[in-house]
Amino acid sequence: MDRKKEVMIMKKEIISTTKAPAPVGPYSNVVKYGNMLFISGMASEDATTGEILHGTVAEQTENIMKNIKAILEDVGSSMGMVLKCSIHMTRAEYFSEMNQVYASYFDKADGYPARVTTFGSEMYDGLDVEIDVIAGIEE
């Protein structure tokens, strides 16, 4: 019996969205590869104007997570499809403040995404948090 193997060729696709501040350097906000989404590091910015939104670590995290959620929904995914987050922070003592807001964006029943958190990162314009995401998208 002859069996044919189906070969799926995946291509990298750059996705534009108005739900994220425009890139300020040589990077894309969202890259799709197969059924995977890679969202570049998001800082506390207004998604429309790109204006930096200062505030407490909780406020910065809220702005970031709100933007990430909007991006995911705009491209056909959701917070429930987040597989991994990388969180970069200036100081370890801000962890609990960030973590409380971060956790509120996920449904515990879906299971939390994998995560890494690093401290000691110097951020631009006095910000304290940056988050990048890998998520799935249903085809």
Image (cartoon, grey):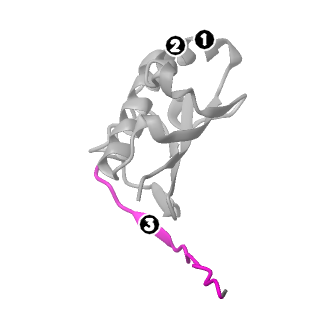
Q: Which residues are magenta?
A: 2-18
Badge 2 local density, few (<14 within 10 Å), some, or many (20+)? few
In the image, farthest residue toward the bottom: 2
Q: CA distance from mark 2 to mark 3?
A: 32 Å
- Closer to the camera, 126 or 116? 116
13 inside magenta stretch: yes
Instruction: Check the image and report above or below for 97 versus 136.
Output: above
Side of 1 where 124 appears, left or right:
left
- Closer to the camera, 107 or 46? 107
41 inside magenta stretch: no
At horizontal 55% and vertical 36% (from top left) the residue drawn is 131
**SS of the residue under disc 3:** strand
At horizontal 38% and vertical 45% (from top left) the residue drawn is 72
Q: Are marks 1 and 2 in contact (CB under 8 Å)?
A: yes
Q: Position of residue 5 (x, y in %)?
A: 62, 80
Badge 3 local density, few (<14 within 10 Å), some, or many (20+)? some
**Amino acid marked by disc 3:** Ile
At horizontal 64% and vertical 34% (from top left) the residue drawn is 114
Side of 75 where 57 appears, left or right:
right
Mark 3 lies on residue = 14
Mark 2 lies on residue = 100
Q: Position of residue 128 (x, y in %)?
A: 56, 26
Q: Are marks 3 and 1 in contact (CB under 8 Å)?
A: no
- For the stretch drawn in magenta, what is the main secondary structure? loop
**Amino acid marked by disc 2:** Gln
Badge 1 local density, few (<14 within 10 Å), some, or many (20+)? few
